[in-house]
Amino acid sequence: MDEKLLKPYNPKEAEDKIYKLWEESGFFNPDACVEKGVTDKNAEPYSIVLPPPNVTGTLHMGHAAMLAIEDILIRYNRMKGKKTLWIPGTDHAAIATESKVEEILYKKEKKTRHDLGRDAFLKRVEAFAQESHDTIVHQLKKMGSSLDWTREAFTLDEKRALAVRTAFKNMYDDGLIYQGERIVNWDPKMQSNVSDDEIEWVEQKTNFYYLKYGPFTIGTARPETKFGDKYVVMHPKDSRYKQYKHGDKIKLEWINGPITATVVKDEAVNMEFGTGVMTITPWHDATDFEIAERHNLDKEQIINERGILLPIAGKFAGEHIKKAREKIVEKLKQKGLLEKVDENYVNRIATNYRGGGVIEPQIRKQWFIGVNKKFKLRNSKLKGIKSGQEVTLKELMLHVVTTKQINIIPDNFEKTYFHWINNLRDWCISRQIWYGHKIPVWYKDGKIHVDVDAPKEPGWNQDPDTLDTWFSSGLWTFSTLGWPKENPDLKTYHPTSVLETGYDILFFWIARMILMSTYNLGDIPFKTVYLHGLVRDGQGRKMSKSLGNIINPLDMIEKYGADATRLSLIMGNTPGQDLKLSEDKVRGQKHFANKLWNVTRFVLENTEDLNMENKPQLMEEDEEKIKECKRIVYEITEDIERYRLYLAIEKLYHYTWHTFADIIIEESKPHLKEESPQEKKDSTRCMLLSILTTVLKLLHPFMPFVTEEIWSLMPHKKKTLLIVEKWPI
RNA sequence: GGACGCUUAGCUCAGUUGGUAGAGCAUCUCGUUUACACCGAGAGGGUCAGAGGUUCGAGUCCUCUAGCGUCCACCA
């Protein structure tokens, strides 16, 4: 017997060596599996694209949980004999990465990206991204992820850029991508607009001012935006104001002198709120913008892109809004326009969830994807929609989920998905940051050129904007498989089998992938969506730097091994439900790995000289034990097939420890004694070895390192790796 | 304001189609026998948040209530 087995299991000694063995074997690559004869060339394909981690830093426990779940599914299906592919990659995460680098740049050198200029700044970002990428790849390997590294992708590499430009061109030609002057979420700090989904609302106590506006009283938390307010709006059914008719002109004294206000009746006004009267600032408020659009009202800009008041503010022009507010309030007070101040008002402030800048809505020319625009779907492979049929993107997104062509686990998230889609507005895809895919649009002398490639003749200037990072992530399931080029991978592995990710990016990403895949391929991107919960600390709090409660996956791997780390993230992890994780839990799983190690020691000590070529006759009671083990195999297989990994591992844990070790092995001891009849002895030994072999196979997807290490110490095995052994069913 | 989720042993959670309440950790007692003290044998501990309903039977299905949490929404 190998001397290693005499000492406790040491993950550190085994893991890196084992991972290298797997990589060298080529078995992460399905083509190699076919070549080496471990997978049938006509086998059913099984594929997952790795949700690409952002190149903004390092992986956290949420990533680790995702990797554990996906690797289990991949390893299980590989052992089932399927042609199994798991594609690795990383995401350039435009805004997140750019703001991170800007932050570092400012901290270290007190410089902004504009001080460096576009090219020099981008070089910095790329260097940062490369470093992050390398760290991430290292971490992915440490977790034991059986990813096919020959197919690694990056959302911003050449192949993906071609996919992005092709998708843009197609959507533009179909009239789905258009340019429009709309109110957008402008982040003055980042100098870019962000989409509705990238906004985080924070509550803030602030003053709420009641101002005299002619015969009315209006309320506002933002007096600095009010200079241009010349429309006074009330609900058409509000009886308090029935003497005012839509279109009435009223002369009144305002901040910088007398103005003429126009009465507007609109149902968007809430009669219960304040006095039921409001004035509007269409350039800087989304609701006001919509009212102005409905009634064809003037829109005036009050604040510029850097938060500075424009000439309309009179003597306040040139001042930053933050500093001007108090002075403006003072002036209102002097003029007798300030009626009352509520000091306990709680306002909701829009911030950029990456970078934290306070959003200042602005009207700007941007690129949008129209989700309600009709177009003819080409080459439909979707059930219920014919090629050439007129549809909208929104309809496609709803259709594939309502008809169950895509299943979401847990299914209550389908409701959330539908609700979001139903409220979906046109998707603003242009950003004014520098890191990302440049928009494939060129201008010259008032002419516009939209294509995959730049025009040949000189003098054309490319649109300086970049695309929302989710545009390229939306293509991920097929851009990683070679689209738009003809590629056998695309035929074999798309649609992918399952998309596994955290429920927090259901809208950002999953919905966008469904949009992009149904549009560009006329097909679903994946058959099943499996959503895992957030990983929280032992007390259920979010892990964050400020709380200091972050558990780093690499630390856990270092202390307790990758297998223990994986198990702790799978046990008790039900889909869609947040998982509480403490270090104790990881430690407990390490004990399990060691238990398995010791079980092996016992079985091998007793079976080393057993000749499995001439299988001994099994006695009835041993036959019974093997049958019971088979039943467990069926149950566990069923659990994995139905994505109940938490149940599968619990049963396996229980069977291995409390049935196999505590009962079967304990009861076998008398039968292994010298004086026991040879027949009985052989039968017992054969039974033990058979069950151990099965248990190792079943456990392999969950704890690949220790099982592979043990496999290599088994004297009876064929000369193969456990990773490609057949699943015992 | 709307939607969703959670509430089961001291702690963390399972409980898959309704059929006599489960696991791990923690606690207590005992124990070194062909692996394992990162161990074994055993014990205590729950009116399954509350109220009502359907049913022969409900932790599980329905209704309502409470607490906690998450997401969505244009209340100036």
Image: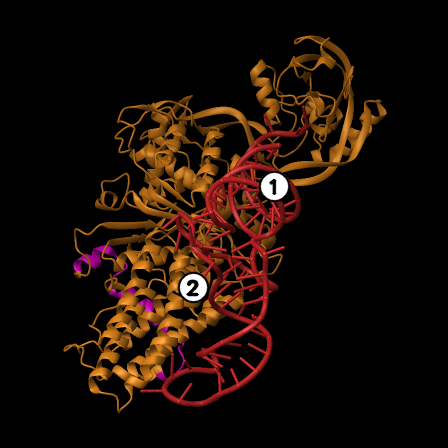
Q: Can residue A68 be seen in this view?
A: no
- Left or right: residue A353 compared with residue A158: right
- Left or right: residue A154 compared with residue A187: left
Is A442 magenta? The answer is: no
The residue to which callout 2 is attached is A567
Is A33 magenta? The answer is: yes
User: Which residue appears at 29% of the width and 59% of the height?
Assistant: A634
- The spot of residue A82 in percent (x, y) is 23, 54
Instruction: Locate the C terminus of chain A and report the quarter of the image it occupies.
Output: bottom left
Vertical placement of A312 versus B3: above or below?
Answer: above
Instruction: Pinpoint the chain carrying mark 2.
Output: A
Between A24 and A407, which is closer to the camera in this rendering?
A407
Q: Which amino acid does label 2 sit on?
A: Leu
Chain B in the picture: what colour? red
Chain A in the picture: what colour? orange
Between A348 and A639, which is closer to the camera in this rendering?
A639
Quadrant hosting residue A718: bottom left
Q: Which of marks 2 and 1 is in front?
A: 2
Asked if disc 2 and disc 1 are in contact, CB closer than 8 Å, the reply is no
Callout 1: SS: loop
The crowd level at tag 1 (other Cα within 10 Å; few <14, some 14-19, many 20+) is some
Callout 2: SS: helix
What separation in Å lies between label 2 and label 1 (alpha carbons)?
39 Å
- The spot of residue A373 in percent (x, y) is 40, 23
Per the rendered image, the range of residues in magenta is: A6-35
The residue to which callout 1 is attached is A357
Q: Which of marks 2 and 1 is nearer the N terminus?
A: 1
Quadrant hosting residue A334: top right
The crowd level at tag 2 (other Cα within 10 Å; few <14, some 14-19, many 20+) is many
Main SS class of the magenta portion in the image: helix
